[in-house]
Image (cartoon, rainbow, N blue to C red):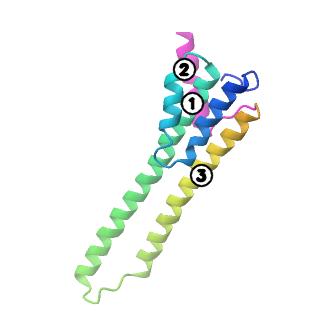
Amino acid sequence: MHPSTGQASQEERLLAAVAHGAALLPFFGIIVPLYIWLTQKDWSKCVRFHAIQALVHQMILPAATLAVYLVGVWGFYDTLMVRLSTDPSGAIPTGMLALRCILVIGVLGGWGFTVTLGLMGMSHTLAGRDFLYPFIGRWVASHMEEKDIS
């Protein structure tokens, strides 16, 4: 079981909320929860849990979104270059433009999802309610328990 936010002090809840809220800073948001975790991990189990949970979330989701985008873009440009080398008119197929639009929307959606979950975590912890990221929260909690037992 993860540390309860309801039992945490106002200062602990504020630090946990800042770690979650750092999701608003694309690509640099991981620095805030990392700093909070490194400096406060021995002070509070609650802050440690929320900082590491936010850190993992802010590393995995944007990285996965970027990876999907890059794979799609490489495929897009590779196909486009083959198409342009064989078609002297230089016309870009409609399907390729649609793929590009889908990839851009996917990246924006992935970033929006990252920010939305971060803001949810921030509001829950400030209110003294527990918050777990989907999939990540339980995994972090189980690894913290193993570390605390040993």
Q: Which residue is mark 1?
A: 51
Specify which label sits upstream in the sequence, 2 or 1. 2
The type of residue carrying mark 2 is Lys
The residue lying furthest to the front in this view is 11
Specify which label sits upstream in the sequence, 3 or 2. 2
What segment is highlighted magenta in the picture?
Answer: 129-150
Q: Are marks 2 and 1 in contact (CB under 8 Å)?
A: yes
The type of residue carrying mark 1 is Ala
- Mark pair 2, 1: CA separation: 9 Å
Residue at disc 2, secondary structure: loop
In the rendered structure, the answer to whether residue 97 lies left or right of residue 82 reads right
Residue name at image x 24 percent, y 82 percent: 86
Q: Quadrant of residue 4?
A: top right
Within 10 Å of the Cα at label 1, are there few (<14), some (14-19), or many (20+) other Cα atoms?
Answer: many
In the rendered structure, the answer to whether residue 49 lies left or right of residue 78 reads right
Rendering coords of residue 75 (x, y %):
34, 65
In-front residue for pair 44/148: 44
Prevailing secondary structure class for the magenta stretch in the rendered image: helix
In-front residue for pair 30/146: 30
Image height of 38 relative to 108, above or below:
above
Q: Which residue is mark 3?
A: 113
Total labels drawn: 3
Rendering coords of residue 54 (x, y %):
56, 36
